[in-house]
Image (cartoon, grey):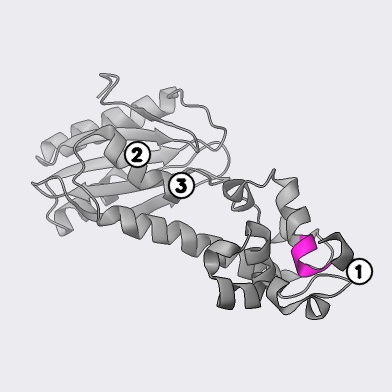
């Protein structure tokens, strides 16, 4: 493709243009950079959209999860990426994350910490800030509801135990799983994490809606209070 370097995408052979490749060869024929190029539409005076996309991916070591952590300001630092293009890329990555979440919801029962972690990792594993999520189960251990309860900064978030129990009662849940992510990748539970777990467990017990687990989620793994005998 080096011979095309100084050409705009419109000057490329039809079969090499990302949109045309998608139409005639299918989605699988496109690289990550070509898919991003379709989103941003154009590059800059020195780079085609594909070349610019390759450069953006190169800064995150071609890791789409890492790309998903970039915000609008980070993407706008690339020449040729304005606010509208940055928002388009972020929105597309978020749709992918939600698609994974939707597919996971249709899957198996939550019978282990791994089931819950696999459901939550696409949602929160690669976030750059901390979020706290709730999963509500029925008596067959099927997920009947899930939602983000709160979000914070890089180092923490807060939860309202009463709000969680209110949600559980409204949805007629028979058990609860709570989870939060550690953007640092550290899987060690803090003293604050243990305090929250204890408070949630005791409050849920009073309402006869047991807390099954509290998970700490990272991009590459998870920690389960239940598996560790800490709940």
Magenta stretch: includes residue 144: no
Viewed as shown, does residue 132 lie left or right of 61?
Answer: left
Q: Nearer the viewer, residue 132 or 119?
A: 119
* Quadrant of the drawing holding the N terminus: bottom right
Considering the numbered disc 3 on the image, is that residue within a helix, a strand or a loop? helix
Between tags 1 and 2, which lies in front? 1
Residue drawn 58% across the image and 45% down it: 128
Mark 1, other Cα within 10 Å: few <14 / some 14–19 / many ≥20: few
Viewed as shown, does residue 157 lie left or right of 106?
Answer: right
Distance, label 1 to label 2, CA atoms, is 46 Å
Residue 102, position as x, y percentages in the image: 34, 60
Q: Nearer the viewer, residue 163 or 120?
A: 120
According to the picture, the residue beneath numbered tag 1 turns out to be 6
Viewed as shown, does residue 121 lie left or right of 144?
Answer: right
Q: Which residues are magenta?
A: 47-52
Mark 3, other Cα within 10 Å: few <14 / some 14–19 / many ≥20: many
According to the picture, the residue beneath numbered tag 3 turns out to be 124
Main secondary structure found in the magenta portion: helix
Residue drawn 30% across the image and 30% down it: 197
Considering the numbered disc 1 on the image, is that residue within a helix, a strand or a loop? loop
């Amino acid at each position: 493709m080096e011979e095309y370097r100084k050409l705009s995408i419109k000057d490329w052979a039809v079969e090499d243009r990302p949109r045309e490749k998608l139409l005639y060869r299918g989605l699988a024929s496109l690289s990550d950079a070509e898919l991003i190029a379709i989103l941003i539409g154009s590059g800059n005076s020195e780079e085609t959209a594909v070349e610019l996309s390759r450069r953006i991916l190169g800064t995150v070591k071609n890791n789409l999860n890492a790309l998903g952590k970039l915000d609008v300001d980070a993407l706008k630092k690339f020449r040729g990426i304005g606010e509208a293009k940055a928002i388009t890329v972020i929105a597309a990555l978020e749709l992918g994350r939600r698609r994974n979440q939707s597919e996971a919801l249709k899957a198996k029962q939550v019978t282990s910490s791994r089931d819950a972690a696999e459901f939550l990792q696409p949602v929160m594993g690669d976030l750059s800030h901390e979020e706290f999520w709730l999963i509500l189960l029925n008596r067959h251990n099927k997920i009947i509801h899930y939602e983000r309860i709160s979000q914070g900064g890089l180092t923490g978030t807060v939860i309202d135990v009463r709000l969680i129990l209110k949600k559980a009662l409204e949805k007629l849940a028979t058990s609860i799983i709570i989870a939060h992510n550690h953007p640092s990748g550290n899987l060690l539970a803090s003293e604050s994490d243990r305090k929250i777990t204890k408070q949630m467990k005791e409050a849920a017990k009073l309402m006869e809606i047991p807390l099954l687990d509290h998970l700490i989620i990272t991009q590459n793994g998870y920690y389960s209070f239940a598996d560790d005998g800490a709940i």
